[in-house]
Image (cartoon, rainbow, N blue to C red):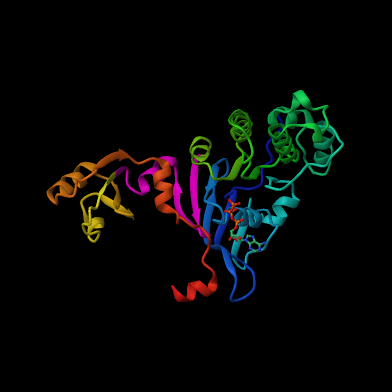
Amino acid sequence: MSMKQTTGSGAAVELTGVVKTFGRAGRSVRAVDGIDLSIGRGETVALLGRNGAGKSSTVRLLLGLDQPDSGTVRVLDRTAEHAVRDGLVGAMLQDGRPIQRVTVRELVDFVASTYPKPMPVSEALALAGVSDYANRRVDKLSGGQTQRVRFAVALAGNPELIVLDEPTAALDVEARRTFWDSMRAYARRGNTVLFSTHYLEEADENADRIVVIDRGRIVANGTGDVIRGSAGRGLVSFDLAGGPTEGLERLPGVVTVEVSGDRALLHTDDSDATVRELARLDAIRGLQVSRATLEDAFLSLTAPTAAPVSDSERETV
Ligand SMILES: Nc1ncnc2c1ncn2[C@@H]1O[C@H](COP(=O)(O)OP(=O)(O)OP(=O)(O)O)[C@@H](O)[C@H]1O
């Protein structure tokens, strides 16, 4: 195992009041709308959000590929560009395609040679799980194998922080599992990992902490359990049967209320108390009680259409 580099004692990632707008005035979109986020060294953090929530935009800011309109981005005690230039950050972006006609080993070897303190090539290949096909051409591999080669490329510079934008989006279940095994092995060395994903289970299983992002803002931040509880630990639903929806949020235990058609869904911290009160009000037609899952919490925290509010819309809100 290679020696860890040491780069000071601050957070691995520190975003403060970060705003990033795309487009021209009047028709602009706030892809990132005031994000404050601190990630400690050695943490594995999932950025979870729907399509268009602002995950990729946040990742690009972290890699110094874009500049924020306002706010600050610090990575390992320096600017993002500086951290990348110093070889401290490895990245897997969504659209990166490895160059063709070279073998896996040649590719990783070449990338490693561009860094000041690279990881030994055999180690990067082993950690990414690609040693078995190191002598095969990169353009002759399956989707899962290609993704792991891209992981080996991201590891080549021996980074302290790795940033993965939806790394498993195109992989089957088995390929995903092996991918995460490799990623966790890298994290166990004391490294920091930030990955974005649509998959709740993936965030729950592989991250120490989940940051839920919606419309360019952080709407929840904590362990899977914290997120699960943030919208209430229980779910109580019933048919409104034409009854009123006002006041449901004031029922005992209730944290949030969703009404869909003629059905009310209450997220509650105390299902028993909520149900008792509903019974008293005789509002128990089609009553169902269940434990809230991470998905329930996620759905209640994020808007159904996650398109960010444009500046022109914002003025009218
Ligand atoms: N270069 C750009 N020019 C214009 N708009 C952009 C640009 N990049 C992102 N956006 C817009 O900013 C918003 C956030 O996009 P972003 O790609 O960050 O979301 P995401 O959470 O990564 O989504 P996905 O899961 O679909 O990749 C979207 O409305 C997107 O259309």
Residue in the picture at 75% in, 41% down? 157
Left or right of 197, for residue 204: left
Q: Quadrant of the C terminus?
A: bottom left
Left or right of 207, for residue 99: right
Residue 74 lies within the magenta run: no
Q: Is residue 18 above or below residue 41?
A: below
Residue in the picture at 85% in, 34% down? 106
Q: Residue extending furthest right? A: 101
Image coordinates of residue 287 in percent, x first then y, are: 24, 43
Residue in the picture at 84% in, 39% down? 100
Image coordinates of residue 78 in percent, x first then y, are: 66, 55
Left or right of 16, for residue 64: right
Which range of residues does the magenta coloring cover? 208-235
Image coordinates of residue 4 in percent, x first then y, are: 68, 37
Quarter of image, ligand 1: bottom right
Q: Is residue 180 above or below residue 29?
A: above
Image coordinates of residue 247 in percent, x first then y, are: 22, 59
Q: Residue extending furthest top? A: 132
Q: Quadrant of the N terminus?
A: top right
Residue 226 lies within the magenta run: yes
Q: Please state which of residues 74 and 272 is positioned toward the viewer in this rendering.
A: 272
